[in-house]
């Protein structure tokens, strides 16, 4: 490998203003959205000061509560700064994001401000967009608020991760364009409908749905098929049995009535099964295409008449001839036309259902449940945790990290703990909430859900688990761009290790075999941070002699060494593959 010589005045900040690499790969011809103030926010995420998370307390479920994930975080603070502080540990590591940002409905009377006019956001807009910010329209403001936050979420999302964003008609069109720009149009997965969010403001058409927009970080990396556990099988099976009894072998009438029952029965779980709307002697079934790209290519013979059943281009059969013959004998094949066949898949033989794009919410029950946990009138319009849980079930495996940076009443944490309790998973949640109720409401709900709540007959058992509560603390750099040394050596080491791209699992603490100053190693370099709070440090031969490189499996090709001064000349640095970086601090005081 080529040796690099660099003598740098270190800025630490590795993310300089400019385009992210991923952007250059995106479709350049895609239409993009423009609004007043955009030029001020497109690169703002790079300029957000890096702050440390300040741990206020840890909470663990009472003795006797079941095991559940404990390594969770609730952060009180503006999510822009909170998300930035998460980068060193979580960049590219978050498996699933669910956010429910203010919809920008114009309502300012809620416990949180839905009009981007919250004093904290107004102040932020003033600082970032400047004077111009005062004249922005409601939509400009919302877009200015969302853009840098989505950029930060994009950086946190894992390569195979998925983001869900709740939204309504006020901003859905803008949000889609924003998401196209940040996540890439090719990573769009679905615009789902969340039905049951009744609004009483209708004049022409009563709007009773919202949207959930779904994007992948990289669509080619996500699972090919998503499934959710088949809930509420019981009512469907009961209805099928009733119809079979009523109509005997008149399967056509029974099927028609079953389809009608699904339409009338909009409880989400039943509705998700509605593709199983036909009945035959075995039970309810759906019809599936028996071909797939990459399937087997051969001349499939219809055993009833000896004709070859044509195969569409680029597809293959999902079975061999013998299996097909058996399925025909068993009546599991529907001959839709002379040349088209479908395979019957029976409801009682499947454990999972394919998620559908419409989710049905029983009216008001989420608010009622929240009231039973934390009291009535504390938070308007919480999301239904049973539906949010389904989103996680679709995409978030048992060890996933799930992030919600507009946490509100803590629905996401509730959904995560519930899902873990149901399937034994160890999913972790990270919540950010800006308002002062982050502890008294957001965290309080989570505490009650962990320990159980309600009395007598209405009591609900705890789900177990725990979390740590943080505020967004001190900035790592002072206004003069020098280090804020008050944050302590450990925090500074962590940040430098992150900016040097040392993977979390390759970062070392001070008690390592090489040196108390070594930070860890990347694939190509050993990184050393020679820092003493009360003393000027110098990179010289003596210091190099203290590095126990022989304790490493092989000699590193490159060294990145931070210190206050360097006493070695360029040739020496070049010869030994050393990059010196000056620690940004004022050493004239020593
Ligand atoms: C629509 S509510 C979310 C409701 C939540 N899904 C639930 O079910 O309870 C939006 C939340 O985001 C919070 N919020 C808005 N802007 C924020 C910001 N910049 N940083 C952190 N939280 C913010 C609001 O205070 C509010 O609690």
Image: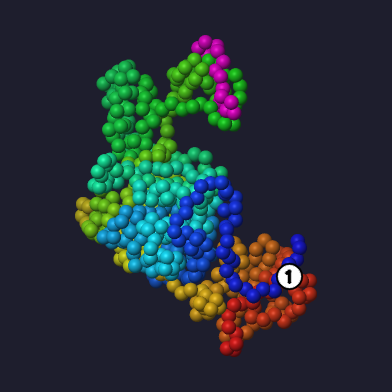
Left or right placement of residue 520 versus residue 333 in this view = right
Answer yes or no: is residue 401 visible: no
- Dot 1 falls on a residue whose secondary structure is loop
Q: Quadrant of the C terminus?
A: bottom right
Give the camera-side residue of 405 and 203.
203
Q: Going 51% across and 17% down the picture, which residue do you hit?
A: 339
Q: Position of residue 25 (x, y in %)?
A: 60, 50
Left or right placement of residue 134 versus residue 542 in this view = left
Answer yes or no: is residue 137 visible: yes
Q: Seen from this angle, which residue lies furthest bottom?
A: 590
Q: Going 47% across and 54% down the picture, which residue do you hit?
A: 34
Number of residue marks: 1
Boundaries of the magenta span: 303-318
Q: Position of residue 495 (x, y in %)?
A: 55, 70
> Crowdedness of circle 1 by 10 Å Cα count: few (<14), some, many (20+)?
some
Answer with the quarter of the image where residue 581 lies: bottom right
Q: Is residue 310 magenta?
A: yes
Q: Going 44% across and 68% down the picture, which residue do you hit?
A: 130
Q: Is residue 533 above or below residue 367?
A: below
Q: Quadrant of the N terminus?
A: bottom right
Left or right placement of residue 207 versus residue 152 in this view = left
Q: Going 27% across and 33% down the picture, which residue do you hit?
A: 264
Q: Position of residue 36 (x, y in %)?
A: 44, 59
Q: Position of residue 387 (x, y in %)?
A: 35, 46
Q: Is residue 335 above or below residue 547?
A: above
Q: Which residue is mark 1?
A: 5
Q: Seen from this angle, which residue lies furthest left?
A: 456
């Amino acid at each position: 490998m080529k040796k690099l010589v660099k003598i740098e005045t270190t800025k630490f900040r590795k993310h300089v203003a400019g385009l992210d690499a991923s952007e250059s790969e995106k479709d350049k011809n895609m239409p993009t959205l423009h609004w007043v103030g955009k030029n001020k926010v497109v690169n703002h995420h790079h300029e957000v000061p890096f702050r440390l998370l300040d741990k206020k307390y840890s909470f663990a479920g009472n003795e006797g509560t079941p095991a559940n994930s404990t390594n969770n975080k609730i952060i009180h603070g503006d999510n822009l700064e909170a998300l930035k502080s998460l980068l060193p540990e979580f960049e590219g590591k978050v498996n699933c994001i669910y956010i429910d940002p203010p919809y920008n409905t114009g309502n300012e009377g809620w416990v949180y401000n839905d009009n981007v006019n919250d004093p904290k956001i107004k102040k932020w807009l003033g600082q970032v967009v400047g004077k111009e910010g005062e004249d922005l329209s409601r939509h400009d403001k919302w877009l200015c608020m969302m853009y840098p936050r989505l950029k930060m979420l994009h950086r946190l999302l894992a390569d195979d991760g998925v983001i869900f964003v709740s939204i309504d008609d006020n901003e859905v069109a803008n949000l889609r364009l924003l998401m196209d720009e940040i996540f890439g149009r090719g990573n769009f997965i679905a615009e789902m409908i969340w039905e049951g969010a009744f609004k009483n403001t209708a004049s022409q058409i009563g709007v009773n749905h919202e949207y959930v927009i779904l994007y992948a970080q990289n669509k080619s990396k996500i699972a090919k098929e998503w499934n959710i556990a088949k809930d509420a099988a019981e009512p469907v099976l009961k209805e099928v049995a009733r119809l079979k009894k009523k109509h005997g072998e008149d399967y056509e009438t029974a099927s028609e009535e079953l389809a009608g029952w699904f339409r009338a029965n909009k409880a989400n779980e039943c509705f998700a099964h509605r593709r199983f709307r036909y009945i035959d002697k075995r039970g309810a079934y759906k019809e599936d295409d028996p071909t797939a790209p990459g399937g087997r290519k051969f001349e499939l013979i219809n055993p009833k008449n000896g004709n070859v059943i044509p195969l569409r281009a680029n597809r293959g059969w999902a079975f061999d001839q013998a299996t097909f013959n058996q399925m025909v004998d068993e009546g599991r094949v529907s001959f839709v036309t002379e040349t088209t066949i479908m395979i019957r898949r029976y409801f009682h033989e499947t454990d999972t259902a394919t998620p559908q794009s419409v989710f049905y919410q029983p009216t008001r029950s989420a608010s009622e449940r929240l009231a039973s946990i934390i009291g009535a009138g504390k938070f308007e319009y919480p999301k239904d945790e049973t539906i949010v849980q389904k989103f996680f079930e679709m995409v978030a495996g048992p060890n996933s990290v799930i992030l919600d940076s507009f946490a509100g009443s803590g629905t996401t944490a509730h959904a995560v703990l519930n899902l873990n309790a149901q399937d034994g998973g160890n999913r972790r949640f990270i919540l950010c909430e800006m308002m002062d109720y982050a502890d008294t409401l957001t965290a309080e709900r989570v505490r009650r859900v962990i320990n159980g709540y309600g009395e007598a007959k209405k009591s609900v058992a705890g789900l177990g688990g725990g979390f740590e509560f943080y505020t967004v603390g001190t900035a790592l750099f002072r206004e003069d761009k020098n280090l804020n040394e008050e944050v302590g050596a450990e925090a500074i080491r962590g940040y430098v290790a992150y900016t040097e791209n040392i993977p979390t699992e390759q970062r070392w603490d001070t008690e390592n075999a090489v040196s108390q100053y070594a930070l860890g190693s990347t694939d190509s370099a050993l990184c050393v941070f020679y820092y003493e709070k009360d003393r000027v440090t110098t990179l010289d031969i003596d210091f190099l002699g203290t590095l126990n490189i022989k304790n490493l499996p092989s000699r590193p090709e490159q060294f990145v060494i931070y210190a206050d001064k360097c006493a070695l000349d360029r040739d020496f640095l070049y010869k030994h593959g050393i990059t010196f970086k000056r620690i940004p601090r004022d050493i004239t005081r020593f």
